[in-house]
Amino acid sequence: MSFTSPVYLIFLAIVWLLYWQLNRRGQNILIVCASFTFYGWWDWRFLALLITTTGIDYAVALVMGHEQDRRHRQRWLLVSLVSNLGALGFFKYFNFFSVQLAHLLTTFGLNADPILLRVILPLGISFYTFQALSYTIDVYRGRMQPVRDVVQYFCFISFFPHLVAGPINFAKDLLQQFKQERRFDQNEAAEGARQILFGYFKKMVVADNLAPLVNAAYGNITHATAGQLLLATYGFAFQIYCDFSGYTDIAIGSAKLFNLHLMRNFADPYFAQSIPDFWRRWHISLSTWFREYVYISLGGNRVGKSRQAFNIAIVFLLSGLWHGANWTFVVWGALHGFFYLCSWFLLPRASDEESSGFIQIIRILFTFHLVCFAWIFFRAPSLGDAWMVVTKISSGLMIHLSPSAVQIKLLLLALAVCLFEWISRRRVLAFNVARWHPFARWAFYYGIVLIVIAYANLHYVPFIYFDF
Amino acid sequence: MRKPGELIIGGEVPDARATSESRLQDRCESRSGFLAFVARSAVFFTPLLLGIVMIEALLWQAGETWPLPQVIQFQEKHPHSFFDRLVIDQATQRYKYLQVLRRRPQILVLGSSRMRQFRAEMFGRQAAVFYNGGGMIHSLEDLRDFFDRLPPEATPKTVILGLDFWWLNGDEKKLIGASDFFRVTVETDGALKWQAHANAIAGFLRQPVSLLQAIRTTFGTKRDPNAIGLQARLQRQGFRLDGSKRIDLEIPSTPDEWRERLPSDEFLRREILDGHSPFTLTNELSPALLERLRGVVSKMQKRGVFVIGYNPPIVGQSARVLPTAPHQKDFWREYHEQVPELFHQIGLPFFDIVTPQQLGLDDRYMRDWCHTHDTFDLNVLQHFCDDPKIRALFPDVPAVAKRALSSPRTNPLYLDLTDQ
């Protein structure tokens, strides 16, 4: 059940109406049932995997809660790590590493055919395994007590708005909310509905209409001109942002209808003034996860500078690999790691506010173009293709761009989203719609609803992050 | 620090009644807030839902969203009705395929839109066993997929197969890409897909004028009760029960008007020389596609189908440019040599009608540069019947042609078939 299908809206309305008729326990049971239905709608077999791997985490955490011996706790944590990362590795990376191993053996003169599995990648596995791991690691570290109530636990793991593409929430934030009484809050609900509406606008109007422009160029790199590839690269930067942040808005907005709060995932990333700044604004939940559970585990800031740089590089490589079993993602991660380290070593420690407006704009544009450069590797089907895009663009920059009227409209739309974010960069909302006169407010909402209906690309375009 | 549940000596004891009262008050406020929000949401969404319901009612009234089996049943009860959708989808493949399954015709016309004007009445007493599947097949792959899908009991005895010359142009194929058009579209009826409905509503929102037109043609005084679908109502055109297409064309009254209906000679020349589809530049007839044609036709033959191959004509000007165009001439020559030869080898007839002039007619008999119309198609059938084998298959065609073509009410586009 995709967020962009009308089935989801009907499902959401039914669950929401039922939810507010129940007490806390009933609400939690309803959330688990609804979430399993939501997930099983794609393929019920995925549900079995979800329950099995996260069920192991539930049991492991309970055992760790009783266990005083550190070594025993470590062993149980290992069980959780092996079951989660094992499932992730099996479904997502087995074929990739099998092919790489076969290539490696071939270079040493050993002829080996890769063993390939015919399995499909369960939806959202990268997200829910990380979320479940955050729980067991936190229990292991003694940061939180294990939860006994299995319903609360599965609410935390499978709450349908965040289940398939995040944001990745931490147990200490989200699990706590399922333990508490929830009261209906009109302002929260209205805010949630607004966020859902803007999410649909970003996803269905901006991202999905940019998709054909990007696909046309990146699907035929050999014949595409430098101008087309350049436009498509800028287009992809906005497509992936509007796609993923649109999804996140729908997820966070849906959760708010239930008076539940999910983690913020984006904070105007294309206005970042450096790559480290970009990573404080882009996919915040994932970067926080890597910081908490990988970077800090590797020593964090407590180690020497060179070791710290090494740790940063490791985090970015893993982050790249997390996005997909392809060298393109690894290179994307490596590029970001490289840019991050360059920025870390070279840029002065001045805060963003200290530099002048002009310098800030230069830094924003520079950072945006570094990010776009890395997106080429993220979007291209292979490293060879990515390199072809880079060489074509760099050798043909003087070629006239000649965008079509449709392309200009789409890029203007993307710029409108940027403008909206620019206005809202120092406040919570660009326009405080809630304070407007009801007539103006409703006219504004109606305008957006009609634009979404009229200009949504209704050919099913899956959310990009469903692939990860 | 105080632990949960720990008693503090001397601490303030909470008033249990006050706590439960405040909880109760909270719950009541939450409940009333929820109901107010539901009411506000209902008020907000009601006009939107009403708008959608009204557009859906309009589409239903126009026949645009009738499921295809319902369209077919209606046409069977109202033989003069005709069907053409506009905003939901075209539905040609599924609609015609369902008709073939239901009618199980013995004489079946297959091909692209260039084959749609053959009509049941042209076959006299065989009208009931005729169906025109023109518009359903757009490539050799479509033809193969159609026969692979067709159950043996629905296999026709005779197929008149229109072979567009670009089906054998390998470079045109590369340009178009995947050739699974029939296989995909035969599965779908837009009336049953929410995306198609949403697209229709979106289209009306983007162009409100079209909504007004739709309302006028559906509810206006000049509405045609035989028209099913918005295109049928707006343009008075659509598929008849026999699969042929009813098209309302104005009959030109002067020679200049006849000429102006067709694209100019210069325009056609440029289209051909620049290689615009379907004249994609190529240097040869694709041997692979020729073999595919042989395979498909042989397969049909093995199923007991007598295939009459036919190359529908194009206007004279195009036919004059193609044999000399640098990247067309070899392909054009090879098509006219190898395709008839292939049919000859298999033992089947092939009629290569390059232009209307070949039958002693002229370009007035063409609806546009590549589509013929009713009168021309009866002339073609009459020409087919010069072959004794085909005359035996269509015994009534010569008499029908004689009567209709000599009628004073017949013109280069329309036939007088009233006596048939």
Image (cartoon, rainbow, N blue to C red):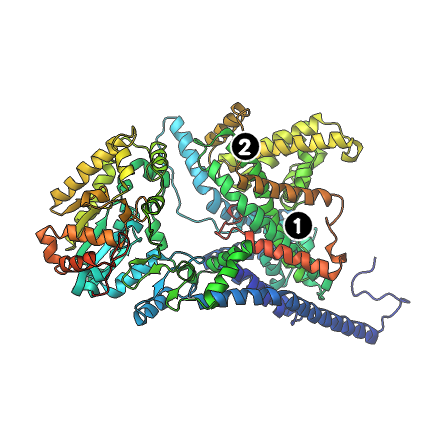
Residue lying at 72% horizontally and 64% vertically, measured from the top left: A186
Residue lying at 46% horizontally and 30% vertically, measured from the top left: A384
Q: Outermost residue toward the right? A: B10
Position in image of residue A162 (x %, y %) = 60, 54
Location of mark 1 (residue): A138
Residue lying at 34% horizontally and 70% vertically, measured from the top left: B74
Work out whether A147 lies above or below B334: below
Position in image of residue B251 (x %, y %) = 33, 53
Position in image of residue A128 (x %, y %) = 57, 51
Residue type indicated by callout 1: Asp
Q: Secondary structure at mark 2?
A: helix
Residue lying at 73% horizontally and 55% vertically, measured from the top left: A433
Task: Using the image, tell me which numbered label, if any, was put on residue A230.
Answer: 2
Tell which circle, 1 or 2, labels the residue nearer the N-terminal end. Answer: 1
Residues beneath discs 1 and 2 located on the same chain = yes
Quick one: label 2, few (<14), some, or many (20+) residues within 10 Å? many
Residue toward you, A224 or A40:
A224
